[in-house]
Image (spheres, helix red, strand yellow):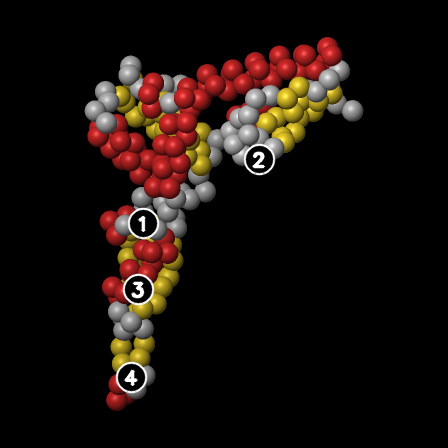
Amino acid sequence: MKSVEVRGKTVEEAIDEALKMLGVPREWVEVEVMDVPSRGILGIARKDARVKVTVRRSKADVAREFVEGVVRRMGIDAAVEIRRAGGAVHVDILGKDVGFLIGRRGQTLEALEYLLKMVTAGCETGDEVVVLDVGGYRQRRERQLEDLAHRAAKQVMRTGRAVMLQPMDARSRRAIHLALQEHPGVSTHSEGEEPNRRVIISPRS
């Protein structure tokens, strides 16, 4: 659970400051008042309020609420499934007409995932990664990238010359690196600046 202790001239001031630090709304937290403000003799000395504010909403809860809200507002007939695996919260949007949520080369999906990560950033399980998928697109894309990596590796082995792949986003480049990290005959590295950064597959020296 994510908690902070904050002081303020009043209890409400301390709570407001804690909410700013955590980046979450009031309804997500539990507040424990540790000290109430008080004045000393003749009003000279003053003890500030002190509160402990703890986030009670999990990333899975907030992720479901956010994605279901997006789907509902867009008028999409789709289901939202949440699962935890490998230290991540996986959010899957499933339905017949969800393809436009993927976009060209997954750009719309990436934008939605970025928003989802922003929304869940202050949640209780702060160390969990949030992964958004639409209609199994990411799994299909990973298989395609693995096939591409192995075809390129065969070409490198056959010709003895390095192969430069097309520009890819960081997630896609990582999939290529992982697919070939144990390959005995080739090595991989990335070159260039975003958004034109590419993977280079070279003969292993």
Provide the residue designation for mark 2. 193
Q: Position of residue 73 (x, y in %)?
A: 21, 30
Looking at the image, is 120 positioned above or below residue 51? Answer: above
Q: Position of residue 6 (x, y in %)?
A: 36, 64
**How far is the residue under mark 3 from the one under mark 2?**
44 Å
Among the 4 quarters of the image, the one containing residue 126: top left
Amino acid type, callout 2: Glu
Q: Nearer the viewer's eye, disc 1 or disc 4?
A: 1
Amino acid type, callout 1: Val
Res 24 label? 1
Q: Position of residue 105 (x, y in %)?
A: 44, 22
Amino acid type, callout 3: Ala
Provide the residue designation for mark 4. 40
Mark 3: few, some, or many residues within 10 Å (few <14, many ≥20)?
A: many
- Which numbered disc flags the more N-terminal residue, 1 or 4? 1
Q: Nearer the viewer's eye, disc 3 or disc 2?
A: 2
Looking at the image, is 12 positioned above or below residue 92? Answer: below
**How far is the residue under mark 1 from the one under mark 3?**
14 Å
Q: Secondary structure at mark 2?
A: loop
**How far is the residue under mark 4 from the one under mark 3?**
20 Å
Res 60 label? none
